[in-house]
Image: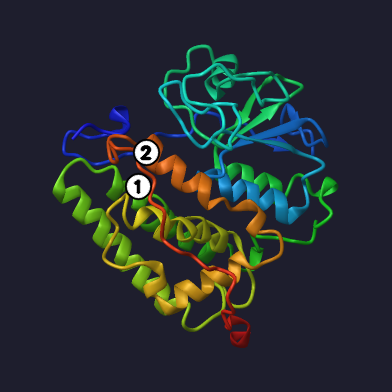
């Protein structure tokens, strides 16, 4: 099987994700060249990507929409990469199109990467936080961007008291976030992008072992850390919301669906129904991106019409508070 991303594939068939290239820090104390300021930074994202979606959620929940602009890329990534074209799908692939980038008029996100680093040759990824003053990408690591949105932009955040990284659980929170990344967030990709049987089975079994543990944990508390929503909850949410629609079938993570887990499913609905969150989710973008972009896995590029998902039903988890 041809690898989805050959440079990130081992000879034994394992997927090894590349490191983020841009890790500059924005500060509110003049400790870095990048000062926190309203209107200076712009977020490039795809609603299909779980990593980018977490930054969209943080921007929404902190109330930073006026302070930090955002552009949503077309969910269909072709041989030229992420494109600034109408994400509704009305522009045919390969056809000339008007750029939807309001900042630079770029047609492809790769242009932003090349402007930031002319020698950049690795895979172009979302999210990317652009500095309009320095005219470059400051950071393309979702972990960093979420942390900065949570902390250093508080002077411009209406919801400045909303803190997704509480100090009281810092060590345990970091440990759980690492567990989620290794086994769940990136675990679905390690299964889906494996090119040999054994790496696929190892990754898939670890994924479901982790989901089993999380199901047990969520049988005892409303969220991962009691009644308070923290970063780890949104980290897990971004994988769960894509699971039954994409990862279960497309990535062959099919031992069980999330809907087969009573606590994980009700937890997913609980988070989805939090104010503003439904606005950050596009199942259409998610399905079109995975099924139409990853032709090595789905060569017909047919997008399935299912599954039927109703995340608006009563979940009952408020009784656990």
- Classify residue 108 as left or right of residue 289: right
Q: Give the labeled residue for mark 1.
A: 189
Residue 72: % across, % down = 62, 37
Q: Please provide percent x and percent y for residue 103.
A: 72, 23
Across and down, in percent, residue 118 comes to 53, 12
Other-residue count near label 2 (Cα within 10 Å), few / some / many at <14 / 14–19 / ≥20: few
Residue that protrudes farthest toward the bottom in the picture? 319
Q: Secondary structure at mark 1?
A: helix
User: Could you tell me which residue is drawn at 67 percent across and 67 percent down?
Assistant: 274
Say if 53 sits above or below 27 in the image: below
Marks 1 and 2 close (CB-CB < 8 Å):
yes
Secondary structure under the numbered disc 2 in the rendered image:
loop
In the displayed structure, 226 sits above or below 28; it is below
Residue 315's quadrant in the figure? bottom right
What residue is disc 2 on? 17
Query: Closer to the camera, 88 or 229?
Result: 88
Q: Quadrant of residue 230?
A: bottom right
């Amino acid at each position: 099987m041809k690898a989805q991303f050959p440079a990130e594939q081992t000879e034994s068939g394992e997927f090894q994700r590349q490191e983020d290239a841009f890790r500059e820090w924005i500060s509110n104390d003049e400790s870095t060249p990048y000062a926190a300021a309203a209107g200076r930074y712009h977020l490039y994202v795809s609603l299909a990507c779980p990593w980018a979606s977490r930054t969209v959620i943080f921007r929404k929940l902190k109330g930073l929409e006026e302070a930090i602009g955002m552009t949503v890329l077309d969910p269909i990534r072709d041989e030229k990469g992420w494109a600034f074209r109408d994400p509704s799908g009305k522009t045919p692939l390969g056809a000339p199109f008007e750029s939807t980038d309001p900042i630079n008029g770029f047609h492809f996100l790769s242009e932003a990467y090349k402007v930031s680093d002319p020698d950049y040759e690795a895979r172009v990824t979302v999210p990317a936080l652009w500095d309009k003053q320095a005219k470059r990408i400051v950071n393309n690591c979702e972990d960093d961007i979420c942390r900065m949105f949570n902390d250093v932009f508080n002077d411009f955040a209406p919801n400045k008291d909303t803190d997704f990284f509480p100090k009281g659980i810092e060590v345990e929170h970091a440990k759980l976030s690492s567990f989620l990344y290794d086994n769940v967030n990136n675990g679905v990709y390690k299964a889906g992008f494996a090119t040999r049987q054994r790496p696929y089975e190892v990754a898939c079994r670890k994924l479901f072992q982790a989901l089993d543990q999380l199901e047990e944990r969520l049988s005892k508390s409303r969220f991962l850390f009691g009644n308070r929503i923290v970063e780890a909850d949104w980290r897990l949410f971004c994988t769960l919301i894509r699971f039954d629609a994409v990862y279960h079938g497309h990535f062959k993570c099919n031992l069980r669906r999330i809907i087969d887990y009573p606590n994980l499913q009700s937890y997913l609905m609980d988070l989805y129904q939090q104010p503003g969150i439904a606005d950050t989710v596009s199942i259409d973008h998610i399905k079109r991106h995975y099924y139409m972009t990853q032709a090595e896995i789905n060569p017909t590029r047919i997008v399935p019409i299912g599954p039927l998902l109703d995340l608006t039903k009563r979940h009952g988890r408020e009784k656990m508070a």
